[in-house]
Image (tube, grey):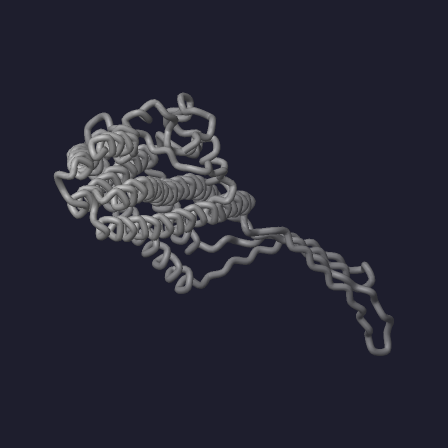
């Protein structure tokens, strides 16, 4: 009878899904673990950060129109009056003047340049806001995936210990195991259930954070992570140079430099003030005396305008320094994000090998316990090691997936908002359905 029980015990253990290695090997052909471009871009478009950048672009376009028109308008003035001569008649008199300040031709050209560069910078800032939104979506999505795979592994452990607890309780009834084994199994099951509840809470929290930041993005009920995360093809130098070359942040900073330089030239040109010209008409003594004249006026102060020109020159130098800092930071971050993607992939490979070894060790511990060759303490230790290895491998897979996706996002090859540039259309080959993750 003991032999029959041991055989049945080994059969039950063989059915227990302790090896997540076999499970994630079977899921290699499942859909991508990231949202498709159409849904991601729509959700990013609705974020307040992008709406703010869109409003700034509308403001820049209005400012460009204002600069094309210029700051000056026609001015009309009229002075009706009555002249009374003591002891004589009373005359109705009036005078009128129409005038307008006129920009010098060079100033008008500079105003158009300033408006053009302002619109260019605002367009690039809008695209960069989309880029920042894509990175924020990826980070929150990856955080949710980590929490989801953790919750799934914890629930698998609960299932394992519920089955083991029943088997161990049966062995205690038959006198084939000590009572302390059942107590230890009860403790292990309670700990697994508590860990699963905590993992569920963490997963729900991560899901709420994602939904709060991107309420327009439909979320699947579960995350199904691919067995093998994608690998970053090409060299590190290729990706880092591509990220720098396509950086909207660098382009916007350079556009601001050009705008500030044009503003500095405009301020220097404004040291020669715009003249005001007009026509003045007089009607005196009830029409007996009439006059028509030209009006010309021009400010002659230079100290205030010189100070404004100096301030504009300083702003241009500041913009150049800011552009250099942006170039430096983007180049550094590009190298760093590519290096992190490579290292995350290497870490996942190592975790994968560790998982295989831990699963083999757990399977041997289960067989040894079923045959009475080892105690429950050894089985608990092997299970704990296998669980830790499974969690580490799945979280490393999420890290590797996030690393590659971050490089592609920074290189504008995924979830990219096009602005009419020469970037390739990265969405042509992406699935348009939401994967059941």
Q: Residue at x 87, y 71 (%)?
A: 89
The image position of residue 401, as x and y in percent, is 29, 35
Judge from the rendering whether residue 297 lies leftward or rightward of residue 363; answer left or right.
right
Q: To which quarter of the image does residue 140 belong?
A: top left
**Front one among 23 and 402:** 23
**Front one among 286 and 308:** 308
Camera sees residue 253: no
**Front one among 188 and 399:** 188
Q: Which residue is drawn at 81% across and 59% down?
A: 287
The image position of residue 161, as x and y in percent, is 30, 43
The image position of residue 261, as x and y in percent, is 35, 47
The image position of residue 8, as x and y in percent, is 27, 31
Q: Which residue is drawn at 19% across and 34% down?
A: 363
**Front one among 262 and 416:** 416
For the C terminus, the quadrant is top left
122 up-or-down from 286: above or below: above
Camera sees residue 318: yes
Q: Residue at x 42, y 22 (%)?
A: 428
């Amino acid at each position: 009878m003991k032999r029959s029980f041991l055989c049945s015990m080994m059969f039950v253990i063989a059915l227990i899904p302790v090896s997540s290695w076999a499970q994630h090997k079977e899921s290699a052909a499942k859909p991508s673990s990231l949202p498709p471009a159409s849904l991601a871009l729509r959700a990013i478009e609705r974020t307040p950060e992008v709406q703010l950048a869109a409003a700034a672009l509308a403001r820049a376009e209005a400012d460009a129109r204002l600069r094309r028109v210029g700051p000056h308008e026609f001015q009309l003035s009229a002075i009706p009056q009555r002249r009374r001569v003591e002891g004589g008649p009373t005359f109705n008199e009036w005078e009128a003047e129409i005038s307008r300040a006129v920009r010098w031709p060079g100033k008008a050209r500079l105003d158009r340049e300033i408006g053009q560069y302002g619109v260019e910078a605002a367009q690039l800032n809008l695209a960069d806001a989309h880029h920042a939104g894509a990175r924020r979506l990826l980070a929150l999505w990856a955080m949710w995936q980590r929490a989801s795979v953790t919750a799934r592994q914890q629930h698998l452990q609960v299932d394992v210990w519920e089955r083991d607890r029943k088997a161990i309780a049966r062995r205690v009834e038959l006198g084939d195991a000590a009572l302390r084994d059942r107590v230890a199994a009860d403790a292990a099951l309670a700990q697994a259930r508590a860990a699963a509840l905590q993992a569920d809470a963490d997963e729900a929290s991560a899901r709420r954070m994602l939904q709060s930041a991107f309420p327009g993005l439909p979320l699947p009920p579960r995350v199904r992570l691919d067995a093998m995360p994608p690998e970053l093809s090409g060299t590190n130098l290729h990706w880092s140079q591509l990220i720098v070359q396509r950086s909207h942040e660098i382009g916007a900073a350079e556009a601001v430099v050009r705008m500030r330089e044009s503003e500095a030239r405009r301020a220097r040109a404004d040291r020669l003030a715009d003249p005001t010209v007009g026509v003045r008409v007089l009607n005196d003594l009830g029409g007996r005396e009439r006059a028509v004249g030209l009006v010309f006026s021009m400010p002659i102060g230079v100290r205030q305008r010189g100070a404004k020109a100096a301030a504009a020159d300083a702003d241009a130098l500041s913009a150049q320094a800011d552009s250099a800092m942006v170039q430096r930071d983007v180049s550094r971050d590009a190298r760093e994000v590519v290096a992190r993607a490579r290292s995350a992939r290497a870490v996942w490979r190592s975790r994968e090998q560790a998982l295989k070894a831990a699963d083999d060790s757990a399977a041997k511990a289960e067989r040894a316990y079923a045959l009475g060759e080892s105690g429950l303490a050894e089985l608990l230790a092997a299970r704990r090691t296998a669980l830790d290895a499974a969690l580490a491998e799945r979280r490393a897979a999420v890290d590797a997936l996030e690393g590659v996706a971050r490089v592609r996002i920074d290189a504008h090859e995924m979830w990219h908002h096009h602005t009419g540039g020469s970037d390739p259309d990265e969405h042509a080959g992406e699935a348009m359905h939401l994967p059941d993750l």
